[in-house]
Amino acid sequence: MSKSTPQRPVGLIHFALALGGFAIGTTEFATMSLLPLFAADLKVDEPTAGHVISVYALGVVVGAPTLAVIGARMSRRSLLIALMGAFAIANALSALAPTYGWMLAFRFVSGLPHGAYFGIAALVAASLVDPGKRTQAVGRVMLGLTVATIVGVPLANWLGQMLGWRWGFGVVAICALLTVAMVLAVVPRDVPDTGASPLRELGALKRGQVWLTLGIGAIGFGGLFSVYTYLASTLLAVTHVGPATVPLVLAVFGMGMTAGNLILPRFADRAVMPTAGALLLWSAVALAIYTVSVGALWSITLSVFAVGIGGALGTVLQTRLMDVAEGAQGLAASLNHAAFNTANALGPWLAGLAIAGGYGWASTGWVGCALALGGLSIWGVALLVEGRRAPAYA
């Protein structure tokens, strides 16, 4: 960031950036809980309405690299404002969608700024602290998303039930506009990198370690989503809890993610790849334990908290991408969230196949365990390749 701008409290800047993450996290996860409401209003069945969630994820995957490349010559502050402004407009339009077709279009557009915002916000947050505290800074930005699973999602769902589903998207638009105002007020002006260009950003795609890091996220993080997507159904069908208990357990999952993003970045700042490997192993074990914990409320709650801690992998891999992307920081950082939305599609799809195959709701944990181990395998390949390319000293 520019050194000529007045210094502002770093914590306040991180809070402004995290507020955008809160808005994004709220709309990403709350859409699932609002699905029955807007499906009925837009006159489609729930499986069809579920495509609204898929097109949002597709928007993230398409928008993350595209907007990062297009915005390569913009200042990071200006790009953040543009991305969150577009996000606010798209969610406001989602709240006003007159038909299912328009809803699909507006949700796709809503997803476009998601990955690029998180990527650029992470770079801005990391640039304001000492190099040894980069992951902690990124973790603070990601806290917005994790807190959204505890506060934002229940709020959006409550508004949807009390005032209508459109308010669930409307409140996200309001949060996005507040983020724009805060970024304008507190984030220092910066001068675009004179050497930045779309071509240089695309250079990230030539680096094997960038692809391996993205692969770790796309596969390894899928395990968390394989369980989370079907958690409510598992609680109702297997644990036999009442509907009112489901949001409480979902909130415990969010608490696990929040705890992970508060604690694990401190270790990643000392040793980023060992921390990533430990998180993947932790996730594999926690997901395996989940399969035998679903019979009682106390055990599934503890298990879900442990699975949520594994969500810190996103923050850790964000720092890893900063290390391996060299001059193409914007694109690589944004692609991290495209990878995690790939995981968000892969995990539930494979878990759904297991359930449809008659293996039961608990089988989602075994699917998740396999995906975490798959991510760990890619992590091992990344270490092996890096070791072979390291210079030898006499």
Image: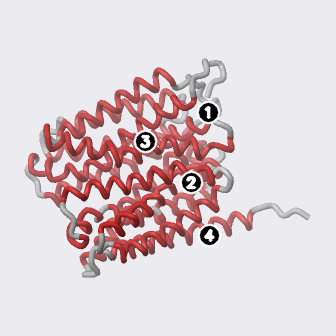
- Marking on residue 128: 1
Residue drawn at x 61%, y 19% is: 5
Q: How far apart are marks 4 and 1 (CA)?
A: 32 Å
Q: Do the residues labelled 4 and 1 touch (CB within 8 Å)?
A: no
**Label number found at residue 139:** none
The answer to whether residue 65 is visible is yes
Nearer to us of marks 4 and 1 is: 1
Q: Considering only order in the chain, which callout, 4 or 3, is on the residue closer to the N terminus?
A: 3
Are the two marked residues, 3 and 1, in contact with CB atoms closer than 8 angstroms? Answer: no
Name the residue beneath numbered marker 2. Answer: 264
| Contact flag, marks 1 and 2 (Cβ < 8 Å) | no
Image quadrant occupied by the N terminus: top right
Give me the C-alpha separation between circle 2 and circle 3. Answer: 16 Å
Residue 253 in the image, given as x and y percentages of width and height: 38, 57
Viewer-proximal residue among 388 and 181:
181
Q: What residue type is labelled 1?
A: Leu
Q: What element carries label 1?
A: loop
x%, y% of residue 47? Answer: 17, 61
Chain-order first, disc 3 or disc 1: 1
- What is the number of the mark on residue 381? 4
Residue drawn at (42%, 66%) of the image: 223
Calculate the distance from the C-alpha at mark 1 to the C-alpha at mark 2.
20 Å
